[in-house]
Image (cartoon, rainbow, N blue to C red):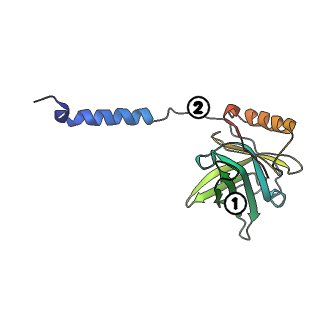
Amino acid sequence: MRGGPAARPAWAATAVLLLGLAGCAAAPRAPRAPLSTATGVDLGRFMGDWYVIAHIPTSIERDAYNAVESYARRPDGSIATTFTFRDGAFDGPRKAYQPTGFDRDPVNHATWAMQFVWPFKAEYLIADLDADYRETIIARSARDYVWIMARSPAIPAADYARLVARVAALGYDVGRLRRVPQRW
């Protein structure tokens, strides 16, 4: 019997494949204004533990509890980074990742590259940092991920609202922010 599914011409299968791939292609995005970064970051003061208060998470941290990012300078100038959290609950399995940070801004020290897997490096911008080095916002020009972090696991509601407003001013959809549960 001719014309059944087994007899379809090869071009039909190719056309379906091409249409499917075209549907997966992203429409070009309008260029975004560059993100401003903090000025005069003292890397020595920035090192240490930062509790993740809220974020637009990457896939590995979507259900993170007690998330902490820790930084330490290495003798070669790179930044040893340890990101730890409990997955799914306060008593969930402990996850730890150890990317390496690279300071790409010799003047302000606010533009880093973060390398989880060689040779790929992701943009990491210190977009906001208070004068006391107690709160920071880490952002990306793509406005896809963001982290509000503090030196303590809890911050006052007014400080949180101010930081969320700053994230919105950076061009993020703050409706996507997830408050990270912290209980110590």
Residue where numbered disc 1 is placed:
82
Q: Could you say whether the residue bearing mark 2 is in a helix, strand or loop?
A: loop
Quick one: quadrant of the N terminus?
A: top left
- Could you tell me how many numbered marks the image carries? 2
Work out which residue is located at the far top of the displayed protein and give it: 3
* Left or right side of 144 for 72: right
Image height of 150 relative to 161, above or below: below
Residue type at mark 1 is: Thr
Residue type at mark 2 is: Ala
Residue 17 seen by the camera: yes
Q: Could you say whether the residue bearing mark 1 is in a helix, strand or loop?
A: strand
Residues tagged 2 and 1 counted as in contact (Cβ below 8 A): no
Q: Residues within 10 Å of mark 1 (few under 14, many from 20)?
A: some
Image height of 76 relative to 83, above or below: below
Q: Which mark is residue 30?
A: 2
Look at discs 2 and 1 and give the one toward the viewer: 1
Q: Which mark is residue 47?
A: none
Work out which residue is located at the far right of the displayed protein and give it: 132
Residue 184: image location, x then y, percent: 79, 53
Residue 148: image location, x then y, percent: 75, 44
Mark 2 or mark 1: name the one nearer the start of the chain: 2
Judge by depth and name the residue closer to the eye, 38 or 3.
3
Residue under the image location 87 percent in, 40 percent down? 156
* Left or right side of 61 for 49: right
Residue under the image location 75 percent in, 51 percent down? 110
Q: Residues within 10 Å of mark 2 (few under 14, many from 20)?
A: few
Residue 46: image location, x then y, percent: 81, 56
